[in-house]
């Protein structure tokens, strides 16, 4: 098994390396994009670390307009990153971006590498304390996505608690019995657990169950090492009493959730990728690697989503732990982000600046997040996530919910409306008419929702120009407003 520390050594320059054109020091005030000639319109590393959300209809220029501009800026400035892929052409797009910015050498295609995430979790720097909880949190991310796919509400606390309890006890049992955790063994423990208390007491189950073997082994180890005794007692009680006594229906639903998920990771590509050795770890993004999770959802379906969400979460965790908090910024990039968003993103985003993590999420509309995160009940989560992605870029959109939401976000102000009206008076034998003209003061939306329907979409119709509205929480732009128009050239 490879030593993880070896993966964290910076690459030694080769003799024929060109002198570096990529910066090696990063200040939060360093500029990434100049959005006009006003110094106040500079978008800096600090701004990127506060997160970015790009909205726009399909074909509005998200990818080729603002997306490309940001991606180029990140690559030119030497950022590391991870790219989650929904569409099949995303890996090629990033290879091209890397070629255009002199970063080809830093591209890592995940499909060509191995990442034994359970081994990594147990052996990475700072591993040890809280290992069970870390593993449970990791599985829960993937479980959340699996649940989203099946259209279940993720806000179900009973369900979440039951899944966590199952995982926690399986991991603990394995850790006490074997000192290490592997996915096939977790799978077997859960698969062969007793279905009722009679079974747990029966000789037949005890002679055949792998779960029972691990309980025996754990009991021996706990006798030898009294420190393990309290944990052993708890996990044995769970497997021999609590688990068999659970209601059949909820129990079989959480068991089948876990076994279906584990099964995905125990076969084919995911097994090759995630359960053998380790040639790449998420911490390498802080050395400038750009990890492309090249299992696009359009081709790999749920497997692509699981791989991406796992890598995203582990990168988020690695960045939260990073010791070089003044080091290289790392981006987390997701086009069609609703495939990959989980409730944890919002928690991560609240401390992202300290970890120099630059999240960029692109999606068509607000409702995409709502349905991904669990429907109407998830509205607070969606609002919180979007609230923590401070820069918002709105491209052309005909989605009324998003346009209204954007207009409300930008806000209202006192506006002067020119008004003119006429009134007629009719009396006996007379008729007079007066016209009144004047200014009327109204409090109204600064941008009307319909204005978003008219933004330039790029392509030949718009001379390869896309026009978007940019807004950043708490920021006044050079034009004195909380928002401004920005034109992004696709060429
Ligand atoms: N480099 C380019 N030059 C000119 N037109 C482009 C270029 N890239 C994309 N387009 C066109 O611009 C429009 C917006 O594309 P795209 O950025 O892919 O939209 P979105 O990501 O919002 O779906 C599409 O009509 C597309 O065909
Ligand atoms: Mg796109």
Image (cartoon, grey):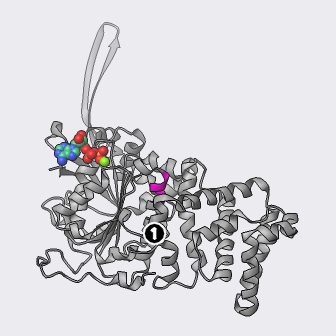
| Tally of numbered discs | 1
Residue 362: give x, y in percent of width and height: 35, 53
- The part of the chain drawn in magenta is 302-306
Judged left or right of residue 193, residue 361 is left
x, y (%) of residue 32? 21, 67
Asked if residue 482 shows in the view, the reply is no
Is residue 91 placed above or below 223 in the rendered structure? above
Tag 1's secondary structure? helix
Ligand 1 quadrant?
Answer: top left
Residue 304 among magenta residues: yes
Q: Is residue 466 left or right of residue 247?
A: left
Estimate the x, y position of residue 462 in percent, counting from the top left: 16, 39
What residue is rendered at 17% in x and 81% in y? 14
The answer to whether residue 467 is left or right of residue 210 is: left
Residue situated in front as seen by the camera: 301 or 150: 301
Of 332 and 278, which appears nearest the observer? Answer: 278
Q: Quadrant of residue 352?
A: bottom left
Which residue is the site of mark 1? 348
């Amino acid at each position: 098994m490879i030593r993880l520390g070896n993966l964290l050594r910076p690459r030694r320059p080769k003799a024929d390396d060109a002198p570096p054109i990529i910066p090696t020091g990063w200040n939060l005030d360093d500029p990434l994009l100049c959005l006009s000639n006003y110094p106040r319109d500079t978008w800096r590393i600090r701004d990127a670390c506060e997160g970015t959300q790009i909205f726009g209809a399909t074909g509005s220029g998200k990818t080729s307009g603002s997306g490309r501009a940001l991606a180029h800026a990140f690559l030119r400035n030497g950022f590391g990153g991870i790219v989650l892929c929904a569409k099949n052409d995303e890996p090629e797009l990033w290879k091209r971006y890397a070629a255009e910015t002199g970063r080809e050498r830093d591209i890592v295609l995940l499909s060509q590498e191995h990442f034994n995430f359970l081994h990594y979790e147990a052996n990475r720097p700072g591993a040890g304390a809280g290992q069970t909880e870390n593993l449970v949190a990791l599985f829960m991310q993937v479980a959340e996505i699996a649940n989203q796919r099946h259209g279940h509400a993720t806000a179900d606390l009973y369900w979440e608690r039951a899944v966590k309890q199952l995982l926690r006890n399986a991991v603990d049992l394995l850790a006490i019995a074997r000192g290490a955790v592997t996915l096939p063994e977790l799978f077997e423990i859960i698969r062969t657990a007793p279905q009722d208390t009679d079974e747990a007491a029966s000789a037949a189950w005890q002679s055949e169950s792998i779960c029972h073997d691990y309980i025996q082994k754990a009991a021996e180890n706990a006798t030898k090492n009294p420190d393990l005794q309290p944990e052993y007692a708890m996990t044995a009680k769970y497997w021999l009493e609590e688990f068999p006594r659970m209601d059949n229906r909820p129990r079989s639903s959480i068991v089948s959730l876990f076994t279906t998920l584990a099964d995905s990771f125990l076969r084919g590509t995911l097994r090759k990728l995630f359960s053998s050795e380790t040639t790449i770890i998420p911490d390498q993004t802080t050395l400038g690697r750009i990890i492309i999770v090249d299992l696009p959802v359009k081709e790999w379906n749920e497997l692509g989503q699981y791989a991406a969400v796992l890598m995203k979460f582990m990168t988020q965790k690695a960045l939260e732990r990073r010791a070089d908090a003044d080091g290289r910024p790392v981006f987390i990039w997701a086009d069609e982000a609703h495939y990959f968003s989980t409730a944890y993103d919002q928690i991560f985003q609240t401390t992202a600046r300290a970890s120099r993590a630059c999240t960029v999420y692109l999606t068509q509309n607000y409702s995409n997040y709502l349905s991904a995160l669990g429907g109407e009940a998830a509205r607070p989560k969606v609002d919180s996530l979007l609230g923590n992605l401070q820069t918002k870029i709105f491209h052309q959109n005909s989605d009324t919910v998003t346009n209204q939401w954007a207009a409300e976000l930008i806000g209202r102000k006192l506006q002067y409306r020119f008004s003119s009206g006429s009134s007629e008076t009719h009396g006996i034998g007379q008729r007079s008419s007066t016209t009144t003209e004047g200014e009327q003061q109204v409090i109204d939306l600064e941008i009307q929702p319909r204005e978003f329907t008219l933004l330039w979409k790029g392509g030949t119709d718009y001379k390869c120009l896309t026009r978007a509205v940019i807004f950043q929480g708490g920021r006044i732009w050079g034009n004195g407003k909380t928002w401004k128009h920005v034109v992004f050239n696709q060429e």
